Amino acid sequence: MSDLFAGLHADDYDRVYGNRRLLGRILHYLRERRGAMLGSAALVVGSALLTAAVPIVISQVIDQVAAGAGLGLRLSLFVVAAAVVAWGMNWARQAITARLVGDVVYRLQCDAADAALAKDIAFHDRNSVGKVLSRVTGDTEGFSSVMTLTLNLLSQLFLVLLLGGVVFWIDVDLGLIILAALPLLLGTALAFRRIARTAAAATRRVMARVNANVHESMLGISVAKGFGRERTVYRDFDGVNRLSYAVYVRQGLIYTLILPVLTLLAGLATAVVLYQGGRFAVLGRLSPGEWYFALQALGMLWQPVTQAASFWSLFQQGLAAAERVFALIDSEHAVVQHGNEPVTGLRGDIEARGLTFAYGPGSVVFRGLDLRIAARQTVAVVGHTGGGKSTLAKVIARAYDFQEGELLVDGRDIRSLDLRSYRRRVGVVPQHPFIFAGTLAENIAYGRPDADHADVERAVDRIGRRVWSRSMPMSLHDHLAAGGQGVSVGQRQLIALARMFLREPDIVILDEPTAGVDPLTERGIQNALSRLFTDRTVLVIAHRLATIRRADRILVMREGTIVEDGGFDELLSRDGPFSELYATYYAHQRPA
Ligand SMILES: Nc1ncnc2c1ncn2[C@@H]1O[C@H](COP(=O)(O)OP(=O)(O)OP(=O)(O)O)[C@@H](O)[C@H]1O
């Protein structure tokens, strides 16, 4: 069994909080709802007093009857009235609790979504969409149940203290008997606590894994179908599902032990109080009414404790869920800035000095890289796959932080610049630009929501009306689906370029698509690119001959090192890595 769970270890964003820290985080959210908490506390006191009054009054009635003093109709009516008012108070308390929990969960979901959005790309590389989704939604819901449960239990705790106090007041020895049983019960519940909590954490993680698996399978369903790999996808799912089954069964077996053990202990304690209370009553130390009250009080005392234990599974799952949400909110950013100097505009001078970057232990991409790109230069980065071209671009775009060396932009340490305003001045055009749900115009204006329709039209003009209207049959008002179904690679690139023209970044980082577009569209894209490339620094991961010809400078990357650096004609004449690359890859391309 232990091997089976070996993969379900906590990762960086899944750390285990100590109890005190976890409580502190929960209280942080409750503190803001102080008014509701106070109202709820007042109702707890009121309803507990009335609930406790009922067995006290009944014991009085019993004693009156035993003493032959009549039925005590007024006292009986009081019992009814007290029960009704206590019910009303309980209802009001639960209504306040529902509101309170709703408010806290709303805030928690906002914070979790905000944290997920603020995380750097390194985080999103390591955590699948399904995993993040299950934290922002499923885990916050899990936490809401633990809050409701805890607030209800806290209200019962007050009743427990009240009833316990009255039993002590009636007879200290009887009180001590009940008190002696409590540690036994609590000790047993606590013994289950640790093991149940570990099981609950494993359950949440395995659920996140199942969600992530289904999500990713569905994302890649067209590729899977294209290669006829549905059975493999199913087998992968089955593996995760079997693990989930095993984790759930183990959790179920642990929880089924808790309630019967606690009920057994409760039964034993009742027998002792029944026997001892009966003896005291026979000896005249207790009245029959007091004996009845002690038994009633014991029943009412066990109730919240056994309830707590029977809800233990939910409680543990909720705590584990809360822990995971807080871990997401509290996790540190991989991209760390040392300063926040605002960036209003960049000349676009980029310099790397002894730059070392690794995605993780053992995956160093470049070590001690030196590079200088002058402002307004167009630099084409070429090289075999896996050479580190995209990684260099991502580090300059500040999607990832580097480990050693320096990266200067306009002579300023990149870490001293305000991240948000720096990113605003850097435009990234990925190979497959993402299309959001919305109109074509909204997609173009994505990076500048303040842009009006005339701005969008101007951006399209800068791409070139002829190429635009030839390649884009849809109008600017047409609606596009999220993910861009029905939008071709070339169309995506044109949309992304229009986004850049609208945004006017000072540094452009562009990853050319490798998928072929027709020669006419390619020529259109190339013309648009040459307009985009003027007056700004451009780093382009080039796959097209036309692009590398247009570049001021070409960098050839191999295994994280720049093996050649120079102009097109210069490199071609050298008979080095570039001319080799040219002969095998670029020479056959038609000039655009
Ligand atoms: N997110 C990641 N986590 C870990 N390793 C990565 C990650 N992305 C890339 N790598 C590794 O870093 C190295 C450089 O990858 P990079 O994507 O920068 O190469 P590239 O030259 O852009 O390749 P291509 O032309 O295929 O896009 C490769 O060995 C790759 O496996």
Image (spheres, rainbow, N blue to C red):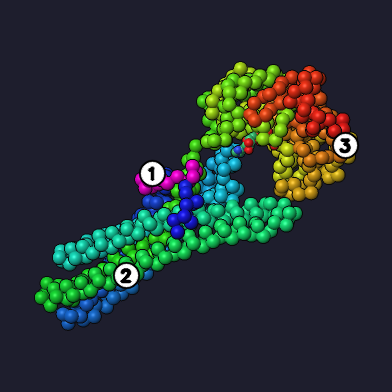
Q: Is residue 394 above or below residue 474?
A: above
Tag of residue 64: none
- x 63%, y 53%: residue: 215
Q: Is residue 176 above or below residue 102?
A: below
Specify the quadrant of the image occupied by residue 574. Answer: top right
Q: CA distance from mark 2 to mark 1?
A: 32 Å
- x 11%, y 72%: residue: 285
Q: Residues within 10 Å of mark 1 (few under 14, many from 20)?
A: few
Identify the magenta region.
11-24
Of the two numbered discs 2 and 1 on the same chain, state the one appearing first in sequence.
1
Looking at the picture, tell me which residue is in the foreground, 287 or 426: 426
Q: Is residue 324 above or below residue 505?
A: below
Mark 2 sits near ligand 1, with its Cβ under 8 Å away: no
Q: CA distance from mark 1 to mark 3?
A: 61 Å
Judged from the image, the secondary structure of the residue bearing numbered disc 1 is helix
Quadrant containing ligand 1: top right
Judged from the image, the secondary structure of the residue bearing numbered disc 3 is helix
Direction from residue 369 to residue 78 in the image, left or right: left
Q: Do the residues under discs 1 and 3 have CB atoms within 8 angstroms? A: no
Q: Which residue is mark 1?
A: 21
Residue 346: horizontal and vertical position, in percent? 66, 21
Residue 41: horizontal and vertical position, in percent? 36, 54
Of the two numbered discs 1 and 3 on the same chain, state the one appearing first in sequence.
1
Q: Is residue 18 magenta?
A: yes
Residue 100: horizontal and vertical position, in percent? 45, 53
Q: As shown in the figure, which amino acid type bears the numbered disc 1?
A: Arg
Residue 426: horizontal and vertical position, in percent? 67, 28
* Picture quarter with the N terminus: bottom left
The chief SS type of the magenta part is helix
Q: Which residue is mark 2?
A: 263
Of the two numbered discs 3 and 2 on the same chain, state the one appearing first in sequence.
2
Specify the quadrant of the image occupied by residue 194. Answer: bottom left
